[in-house]
Amino acid sequence: MESIISAESPRYRDTDDQLIGDGMVFTGYKNRHIGAIHTIQLPPAWRVASTSFAHGGEWMLTTFSPLKNPKIELRIFCRGDKVTISDATYFSELLKQATREVIELKPEHILSLKNVLGPTVGDNQYINQNPPNSRYSARCNLLKGRIINVQQRPVMMIEGLFTAGGVDVTKFLNVYININRDGQDIQEVFFQAPLLAYPVYYRQVRMALESIKWL
């Protein structure tokens, strides 16, 4: 199992023993009872870039960006739409298997999870059979998929590349959270960056993920 760093770790504190991230702790959507995240500690010098939601619904999206590079995005997204019971059951069963070990996802897992992954990531090289340079080719190539534990909660983590004209241009890390443990309600934490910038911000994002406290 991958080690998970506690938010109380000294790595999360500056020389004055204050939590980093400009003092910002995202408190999730607890007042609306949406999603599974109670709090997440933002990386240093990041800010809330935007928040949008559906009035009277369950759809909510918050985007964070570094102050020095607003093109870099970390998003917390509650979809609102439920996945089918059959897809949810498959997803839930996979999560249950990760109580003690990391599960590496195979192409056959991805095929069965395409609706859980959503319309963008789900339309990947295992699903989309159009030629790579065609107008309707796969929008992303998946590099790695795993079921891991984040703060004692199993989640699905996908890494991949978005393409344009058959050329890889953006790398992403997407975490899928089973909100109600039945698999039908999904919350996503999504990070994307240009290829050269991705490794610069990847560690910051992983530490933010590892600071999550669940509802």
Image: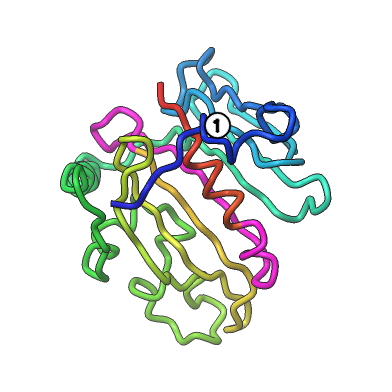
Badge 1 element: strand
Which class describes the residues within 10 Å of circle 1: few (<14), some (14-19), or many (20+)?
many
Q: Start and end of the magenta stretch?
A: 178-201
x, y percent for residue 195: 64, 71
Eyeballing the image, is 154 above or below 196?
Answer: above
Res. 29 image quadrant: top right
For residue 166, side relative to residue 38 (left or right): right
Q: Depth check: give the residue in front, 18 or 82.
A: 18
For residue 109, side relative to residue 70 (left or right): left
Eyeballing the image, is 110 above or below 56?
Answer: below
Is 39 colored magenta in this rendering?
A: no
Q: Residue sitting at 49 percent across and 78 percent down?
A: 137
For residue 127, side relative to residue 99 (left or right): right
Is 191 colored magenta in this rendering?
A: yes
Q: Residue sitting at 57 percent across and 36 percent down?
A: 10
x, y percent for residue 1: 28, 51
Eyeballing the image, is 123 above or below 191?
Answer: below
Q: Residue lying farthest right?
A: 68
x, y percent for residue 123: 42, 65
Eyeballing the image, is 123 above or below 129?
Answer: above
x, y percent for residue 22: 75, 32
What amino acid is at disc 1? Ile
Q: Residue lying farthest top?
A: 31
For residue 6, side relative to residue 181 (left or right): right
Q: Depth check: give the residue in front, 64 or 112.
A: 64
Q: Residue sitting at 54 percent across and 84 percent down?
A: 134
The quadrant of the image that shows the C terminus is top left
The residue that disc 1 covers is 40
Q: Residue sitting at 58 percent across and 49 percent down?
A: 205
